[in-house]
Amino acid sequence: MLENQSICLLNDSFPPLIDGVANTVVNYANILHDNGHPVVVATPRYPGSIEEYPYPVIRYRSLNTTKLVGYRAGYPFSMSALSKIQKENVGLIHSHCPIMSTLLARTLREIINVPIVFTYHSKFDVDFAQALKFGWIEKAAIKVLVNNISACDEVWVVSQGAGENLRGLGYEGDYRVMHNGVDFPKRRADKQQIEAVSLAHHLQADVPVFLFVGRIKWYKGLRLILDALGILKQHQFHCRMIFVGDGDELDEVKQYAARIGVMSSCIFTGAIRDREQLRAYFSRANLFLFPSAYDTNGIVVREAAACALGSVLLRGSCAAEDVQDGRNGIFIDETAQSLAQALLSIGGNFDAMAALGQRAQDEIYIAWQDSVQTAWSRYQVVLDQYQGKHRKSNSVFDYDVELLFRAVAQVYEGMDRMRRTKTSIQRHTRTLGAQVAEKLDRHKPEQQ
């Protein structure tokens, strides 16, 4: 039983980096801890991270790969991290990232002999296609990813669509759908907070407000939203569109909005990390627009529902699972015309939008407390099944995969040494420059 043993949560993203999976790990850790279950988090080291958690957070060596994949890459063979985790009396490992974190999990399993649960959150074929420009590298990376996932003792997916995507990558094992929850309470934000959003952006009560929350990436359906705004403008339909989030394509999105003439309707807030402030944005909006074919779950759709905000979603998308078209959400085809038509049909009817949001709150909201409790119950089953197995030693990797990751590790080590050397040279250069400037200033002749 796991009553006196720790759950080790692994992920490549964790605060101060904020994204959907980092938010998931934070909620798992907080709720497990609050319910009296020991927990430890292991994650790559981030500059400026401040550990203010009631449970251990073990940071291990990392490299800055945020421009490539959106987060830092951890060094998965960190003996110091493995040693620290060993001391935490771990009974089960739960990895939320299929590459480096799961590699660390597999290494750890060989040392402490406990099962690994893996959750598949994102469509990594899309991420790889964006980050890796050469097809053969992309295929090799996907093969490594699938091998890594297949080595876990149980695989969870956040939606049925996520499972189908995983199958499409070549995964042939079993999986279980385990829904994520939301940390928003089931109610709208305080009236004063909602009014503060209106005042900050000069929002008028009789003009509909549409909202998007997420990474500012084209594949989230942002071009579709902007093109739909262009169609609304042609129909002289007045609205405000708020984009909450950051991303390396933010400037491109703004430029496109300006080019097609809808920038005056758009508000770009950047990332909002204060959860209460973000809840106020959800509560102030009249419709949540999330026409993303990329997302495997769309926690933001249930965050919107928590605030009685209905969503407009792509028909057949993962985010639309468990949502009923016309009742607690609106489905559209993946075209700007379809989105614009939906907004023209309901966007001017404030009572209809409010009723849609109320039904969403009543029918599709899932609290993190319920989601994590379901996971905890399943942990017990996984552990019981694992204890009945006989594991071979020294079986952590297929030989070719092991060689690949050893090579990656060596490259990471070399890059890290180069980075530290460069930083040291820059620091000494600045110090020397300051000393020279001080001496020159001391010997400078006085002005007459």
Image (spheres, rainbow, N blue to C red):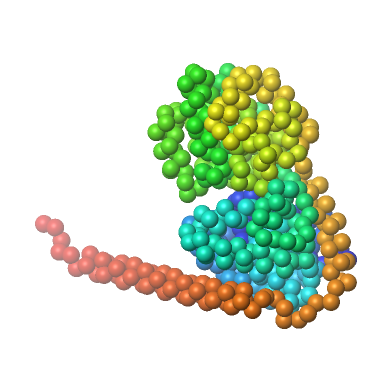
Q: Nearer the viewer, residue 376 or 346?
A: 346
Picture coordinates of residue 172 (x, y %)?
Answer: 73, 61
**The N terminus is located in which quarter?**
bottom right
Residue at the left extreme of this rendering: 448
Residue 55 appears in the rendering: no
Residue 395 appears in the rendering: yes
What is the count of numbered marks? 0
Q: Nearer the viewer, residue 322 or 133?
A: 133
Picture coordinates of residue 46 (x, y %)?
Answer: 56, 62
Please give the name of the residue rendered at 62% of the width and 67% of the height, measured from the top-left corner: 144
Picture coordinates of residue 119 (x, y %)?
Answer: 72, 57
Question: In the image, is 134 to the left or to the right of 195?
Answer: left
Residue 391 quadrant: bottom right
Q: Nearer the viewer, residue 369 or 296?
A: 296
Picture coordinates of residue 399 (x, y %)?
Answer: 64, 79
**The C terminus is located in which quarter?**
bottom left
Question: In the image, is 286 to the left or to the right of 321?
Answer: left
Q: Is residue 26 above or below residue 3?
A: above
Please give the name of the residue rendered at 78% of the width and 66% of the height, measured from the top-left corner: 153
Q: Is residue 148 above or below residue 230?
A: below
Please give the name of the residue rendered at 59% of the width and 36% of the height, measured from the top-left corner: 334
Residue 12 quadrant: bottom right
Please give the name of the residue rendered at 50% of the width and 74% of the height, measured from the top-left corner: 411
